[in-house]
Image: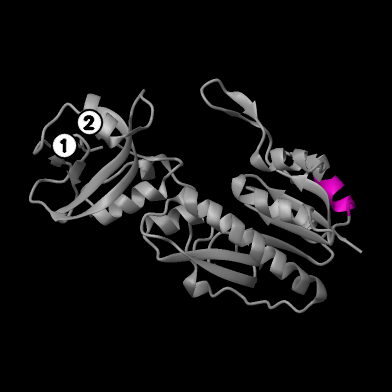
Amino acid sequence: MSKNIIFMGTPDFSVPILEAIAQDDAYHVVAVVTQPDRPVGRKRVLTPTPVKKAAVALNLPILQPEKLSGSDELATLINSEPDLIITAAYGQFLPTKLLNAAKIAAINVHASLLPKYRGGAPIHYAVMNGDAKTGVTIMYMVKAMDAGDIISQADLTIGANDTTGEMFDKLSQLGRDLLMETLPHLIDGTSSRTPQDPAQVTFSPNITPEQEVLDFKASAQSVHNHVRGLNPFPTAHTTINGVRTKIQRTHLIDATTELPAGSVVKKTKKDLWLAAGQHTVVAIDEIQPAGKPKMTVSDYLNGHAKFNEGDQVIDDE
């Protein structure tokens, strides 16, 4: 007999996980819970979440409470008598009454190797901090952020040029596969349960606007990590000759410079190298001046770069 599942998730990360559960005859998704539709873009078009779009395509029942606690939707979920509650980047704390409604367990698919990077932006921090690996943790849910006992984990290498967006896709697939391997053991009672080590806990709160600003006084490696850690969202930026400019992609250069941080080390038709801290150099690959589309550095140098080698072009913010 198939197990009744409540699935809760919101972004693209969650979609492959929902699809795998919904397409497996061992499970019956009684409800998909996701964040309400939000205005998106300059025209503020009301847009459903990626999970809602997937649930519509799968013909699954959808609930979108603004807040779960005290809502009519909460009573509906509890009355559905779920065997399992599975969350993946849902975006709200679950009331204890709902956690307790799961006959087998309420579990979460989290995109880090807990207890490292509890919180809402674990992939961003892993890339920004230059970590060599990250992973996915399946854990029991408790009424504290990402603090439940670990059921299973799988790790994944972060490439030297991998972006957060690329790692989102890889970790989503890893999370899907790990969950589908874990569920049968959870259901038959053979899964493991390991408390998190409080001494190893770190946090990854949501990215603030201040964190989006690049610091060229840091090393080129740090600048590169910051750029790829905020690609494709929310995107790192700086100010070049007074113009707020997003930096989309960079790569490292095996060179040193005596120029001050933020100066132009090399400028050709296709190369823009900037001085960073500790005499290091970073190359710009994709860039977006305010009010312009994203462009290659070649296009930028062809029409927008009104400066010369040796000029200090990065303004302090």
Q: Position of residue 307 (x, y in %)?
A: 14, 30
Left or right placement of residue 186 versus residue 311 in this view: right
Along the viewing direction, whichever of 287 and 39 lies nearer the viewer: 287
Name the secondary structure under disc 2: helix
Residue 115 to residue 30: above or below: below
| Crowd around label 1: few <14 · some 14–19 · many ≥20 (10 Å) | few
Name the secondary structure under disc 1: loop
Along the viewing direction, whichever of 286 and 230 lies nearer the viewer: 286
Residue 197 to residue 143: above or below: below
| Location of mark 2 (residue) | 301
* The N terminus - image quarter: bottom right
Seen as rendered, the residue at the extreme top is 43
Q: Is residue 234 visible?
A: yes
Give yes or no for contact between labels 2 and 1 (Cβ–Cβ under 8 Å): yes
| Crowd around label 2: few <14 · some 14–19 · many ≥20 (10 Å) | some
Left or right placement of residue 56 versus residue 176 in this view: right
Along the viewing direction, whichever of 312 and 297 lies nearer the viewer: 297
